[in-house]
Image (cartoon, grey):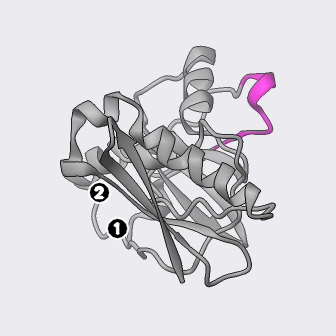
């Protein structure tokens, strides 16, 4: 139920992608780069592995392509690469991690601050970004967060303020970003 498309350089295979045909539209299922070569990646093999299957599938008469899933971390390389393409988020699955934070240690705080993630609530996707209660954010920070983390299909980016009990919620959201952000205390996230 798959096709293998291979990208070559000077007649030698340097990467490939499996296209799976077991659902309503074809899925770009798995890609690989020969020996994980940085040289081939710099040459653009990954872009070719996304571009050529789409043109191939268009020639076959397909109007939609599933680009595959990504991890839910908003700074994940695959997610950020896919955001460059004019694709839309087709939803989410129930697979993933359920996390319960049992204590507010420095290690936990550092993990949350360094790994913004996407989560599902009431059938919608939200981004979770964490800041300390003593940190301030300004209009430039909102602009950077929007550029880095927003993608089509994300309802809002929620900035959770770490602190006791609800953190500092005094940072105003600039008018141009009020539809894209929400600020909440993170106190109720800790068991």
Q: In the rendered image, is residue 160 in sight?
A: no
Tell me if residue 9 comes above or below residue 188 in the rendering.
Answer: above
* 103, 9: nearer the viewer: 9
| Residue 140 vertical position relative to residue 132 in the rendered view, above or below | above
Residue 162, position in %: x, y?
42, 45
Question: Can residue 175 be found in the magenta stretch?
Answer: yes
Q: Is mark 1 on a helix, strand or loop?
A: loop
Image location of residue 1, percent across then percent down: 54, 84
Q: State the image quarter where residue 21 is shown.
A: bottom right
Residue 61: quarter of image: bottom right
Left or right: 48, with 36 as reference point: right
Query: Badges 2 and 1: C-beta atoms under 8 Å apart?
Result: yes
Residue with the mark numbered 1: 101
Depth check: 1 or 170 in front? 1
Which of these two is toward me, 172 or 70? 70
Q: Name the residue under label 2.
A: 104
Q: Residues within 10 Å of mark 2 (few under 14, many from 20)?
A: some
Q: What is the span of residues highlighted in magenta in the rendered image?
A: 174-182
> Percent position (x, y) of residue 140?
58, 15
Which residue is located at x 42 percent, y 27 percent?
A: 135
């Amino acid at each position: 139920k798959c096709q293998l498309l291979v990208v070559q350089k000077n007649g030698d295979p340097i990467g490939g992608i499996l296209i799976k045909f077991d659902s309503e539209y074809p899925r770009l299922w798995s890609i690989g780069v020969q020996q994980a070569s940085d040289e081939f990646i710099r040459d653009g093999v990954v872009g070719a592995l996304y571009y050529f299957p789409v043109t191939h599938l268009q020639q076959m008469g397909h109007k939609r392509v599933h680009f595959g899933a990504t991890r839910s971390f908003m700074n994940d390389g695959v997610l950020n690469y896919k955001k460059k393409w004019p694709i839309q988020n087709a939803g989410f699955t129930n697979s993933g991690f359920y996390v319960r934070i049992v204590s507010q240690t420095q290690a936990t705080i550092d993990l949350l601050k360094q790994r913004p993630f996407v989560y599902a609530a009431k059938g919608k996707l939200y981004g979770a970004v964490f800041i300390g209660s003593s940190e301030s954010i300004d209009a430039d920070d909102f602009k950077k967060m929007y550029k880095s983390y927003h993608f089509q299909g994300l309802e809002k980016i929620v900035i959770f303020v770490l602190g006791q009990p609800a953190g500092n919620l005094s940072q105003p959201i600039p008018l141009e970003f009020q539809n894209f952000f929400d600020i909440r205390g993170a106190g109720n996230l800790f068991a």
